[in-house]
Amino acid sequence: MKTLRNLLKNLPTLLTALVLSIAVWAFAVSEADPTETRLYPQDLPMEIVGLDSNLMIVNDIDEQIELTLRAPATILNELENERSLINVTLDLSGLEAGVHTLTPQVTIGRSPAEVVRINPSSIFVKLESVVSETFPVEIKTLGNAAIGYELSDPELSTEAVVVTGPQSLVDAVDVVAVEVDIEDVSEDISRLLTLKAYDVEDNEISAVSISPGTIQVNIPVRQRGGFKSVVVKIVTSGQIAAGYKLTDIFALPPTVMIFSSDPSLLEGIRGYVETIPISLDGANEDLEISATLNLPEGVSVVGSQSITVQVGIAPIESSISFTNIPVQFQGLGSGLAATTSPDVVDVYLSGPLYLLEALDPATLVVAIDLADRGVGTYQLAPEVLLEDAELSVDAILPSTLEVTITAN
């Protein structure tokens, strides 16, 4: 009893000592690991959860969140080094179609720690019901078919598609179509094309899904009555200059569209029309000539199509050889003499035939350059000095000569 009375008597003192000791411990801990308030050094991604599968978010949501945290310095440091310890979610569970204002939820995997500030602190969410609607497929043509051609009825792999998306967007769809570029087509069209949805003002609505997303489009293209596409056949007269050859000749355009108000006149034209004869007499260079077509009376070229004939002409290439051409020395120093063995060579040249035929072997110069060479014996290659760049040296035999230089 006496011990109990003493304990009770000293209880206030003991409690005071305990409180003081706890305070001292807390102060020591605080001094060693002070509590701080910090802005998290990077934005955190917000995960949207709980969205009903029959609803869609139709407004833009900023899914990056800025956090200000309060915690001991060691915990803040750990959280900054391990971003996965902080989870930010926006819970849409149980929400119906309409406009909602929600607060992001933050879960921190270390304690003690608290969120001082969330930016943004509230998120505006607009939900709409997901609906589907069937639309017929239409075709939008871009451009015009080639002159004299027209399109027949198109064939589609499917006549209707299903558009799925937020109700407001699906309600805004006026037409689902494919775009077909028909500019200058003259043959049947067969293409796999992507479907797009458009509103009444012809603006594309891209935030909906279309099933199927692509369709096969086949459009027959046929020639209109009274029109006919024909090949241009070039007719020439005369001979090009001697020593030259024709390398190419073609018409631009290679085909033309002709027309007659009497279709029976076109039946007698068998796939081509000829030009008025083009003279090549004496030509020795490339030509570009404006040509006239030889058309029957009552038949004309559609539009203002003019015919240009391009003719390629080049010299005939050949080769020739000359034997026993003397070797000359160039650049031999004063007071020196030179000999070579042998002192003649055979030369093989190639180039335009008219230049080779006009070449006088007496004018050929085969030389060896001895500049800066002193007394001695050398193995040197001779060189043919040609005045015309169109000629080339195929070979010199022998290709190397022994040259001896002596003092006079």
Image: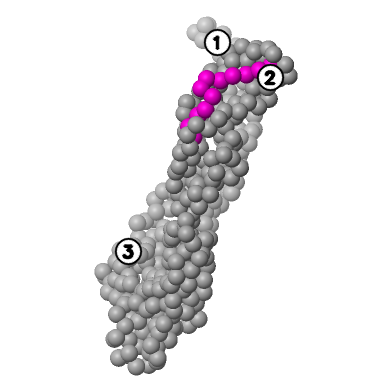
> For mark 2, what is the residue?
372
Report the side of 83 relative to 167 (left or right). Answer: right
Q: Is residue 143 above or below residue 313?
A: below
Q: CA distance from mark 2 to mark 3?
A: 75 Å
What residue range appears in magenta? 336-347
Query: For numbered disc 2, what is the local secondary structure?
Result: loop
> For mark 3, what is the residue?
192
Q: Quadrant of residue 206?
A: bottom left
Q: Is residue 191 above or below residue 149?
A: above
| Foreground tag (3 vs 1) | 3
Estimate the x, y position of residue 196 in percent, counting from the top left.
Answer: 40, 67
Q: Residues within 10 Å of mark 2 (few under 14, many from 20)?
A: few
- Which quadrant would the C terminus be assigned to in this image? top right
- The residue lying furthest to the top in this view is 2
Q: Nearer the viewer, residue 193 or 279?
A: 279
Residue type at mark 3? Leu
| Foreground tag (1 vs 2) | 2
Q: Residues within 10 Å of mark 3 (few under 14, many from 20)?
A: few
Q: Quadrant of residue 189?
A: bottom left
- The residue lying furthest to the right in this view is 334
> For mark 1, what is the residue?
7
Q: Nearer the viewer, residue 197 or 311?
A: 311
Q: Nearer the viewer, residue 2 or 372?
A: 372
